[in-house]
Image (cartoon, rainbow, N blue to C red):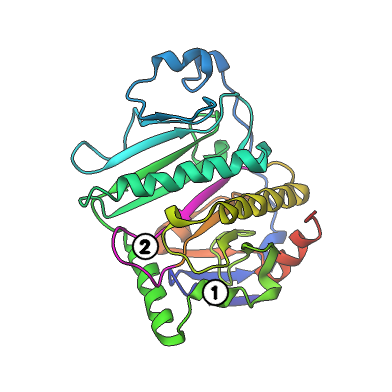
Amino acid sequence: MFEIRQDYLSETQVLMSDERANRPLLIKSRGKFVEDRRACPFCVENRHELSGISSISEDGRIIVLPNKYPAVGEGSGYHEVIIDTNRHGEEFAQFSERDIAKSFKTMFSRYEAMYSDFNIMYMQVLKNDGAGSGASIAHSHWQAVSMPFVPKKQGLIHTKFEEYYNKNKKSYIENLFGEKELIVCENNYAFAYMPHAAPYGYSINIAPIRHISNASTLKNEEIEAMAELFKKSIQALRAEFSWFPYNICFQHPPNGDFKASHFYMELIPRLENFAGLEIGADVYINSHFPEVAAAVVKKHIK
């Protein structure tokens, strides 16, 4: 079956084609890291070499510090690394829900810290997990990249949020809570769903049910609820596909007044590689219709 879809928020064009899932994949690049742990700069025995540390959690598990190899220069933004475990080899997907929630809380606090600088217009929080995700170090960590401009994609997303809210008097994400065939799992405070036109197969978004734009104002029970759904979602995906690299991206409004926006996070399994069509035309191929994929994942939800 073939269908052309367009994501409402980002306006990304997606070619949905389940026949593509049957093509032979003779080249695989989803392997785990092969590394010398003794050289890991994030391990406890090497942390004395870290510089510029801005905060350490009470249990010593989470450390916030400047990226040694920043993507933005001094005066144009900030690039932080957030180490979220003191145990090498402990994958984020293996964290307890409590420790996942602690990581989320730390990430959310970075928005408040960075957006106090009025020169910062947008901050992207992300996690690259696994060699095929873009990560260069296996030890679990996050990155927060603050910029003096709003990326085109995020500018469009939050413009569309405002257009939808003005027309419907509720947020676009609140509307998605009624799309039950796309919902993978839910609880009293959050829900996990597959976007109608995700560029990446088996992508799952997790959002609070309550309309909230600024993640730093989420209540503890909402953060814990999102942590629970992340854990359930990643375990269900791993039950279906075994191990795979993935990305987590927070979709948070830019710095300013964006009350119509609704915070959500993306869990993006890297089951396939991007290729020339995506790079050359910014058109994506998704071999898995979300209505079908959601039903597959639901079978593994515990």
Residue underneath mark 2: 154
Residue 270, visible in the rendered structure: yes
Q: What label does residue 212 carry, if any? A: none
Q: CA distance from mark 1 to mark 2?
A: 19 Å
- Between disc 1 and disc 2, whose residue precedes? 2
Percent across and percent down for residue 98 are 63, 41
Residue 299, image x, y percentages: 81, 60
> Callout 1, which amino acid?
Glu
Q: Nearer the viewer, mark 1 or mark 2?
A: 1
- Vertical arrangement, residue 121 with respect to residue 6, above or below: above
Q: Position of residue 248 (x, y in %)?
A: 53, 49
Q: Is residue 300 left or right of residue 185?
A: right
The residue positioned 58% from the left and 44% from the top of the image is 101
Q: Quadrant of the N terminus?
A: bottom right
Residue furthest bottom in the image:
167
The label on residue 174 is 1
Q: Amino acid at mark 2?
A: Gln
Q: Residue at x 41, y 73 (%)?
A: 161
Residue at 38% across / 80% down in the picture? 163
Position of 8 with respect to 67 (left or right) is right
How many other residues sit within 10 Å of disc 1, few (<14), some (14-19) or many (≥20)? some
**How far across and down, in percent of the image, does residue 30 sit?**
63, 40
User: Which segment did they paint magenta?
Assistant: 244-261
Which quarter of the figure has residue 182? Answer: bottom right
Would residue 241 be counted in the magenta stretch?
no
**Magenta stretch: dominant secondary structure:** loop
Q: Are marks 1 and 2 in contact (CB under 8 Å)?
A: no
Q: Quadrant of the C terminus?
A: bottom right
Point 50% across, 54% down: residue: 275
Looking at the image, residue 200 lies above or below residue 55: below
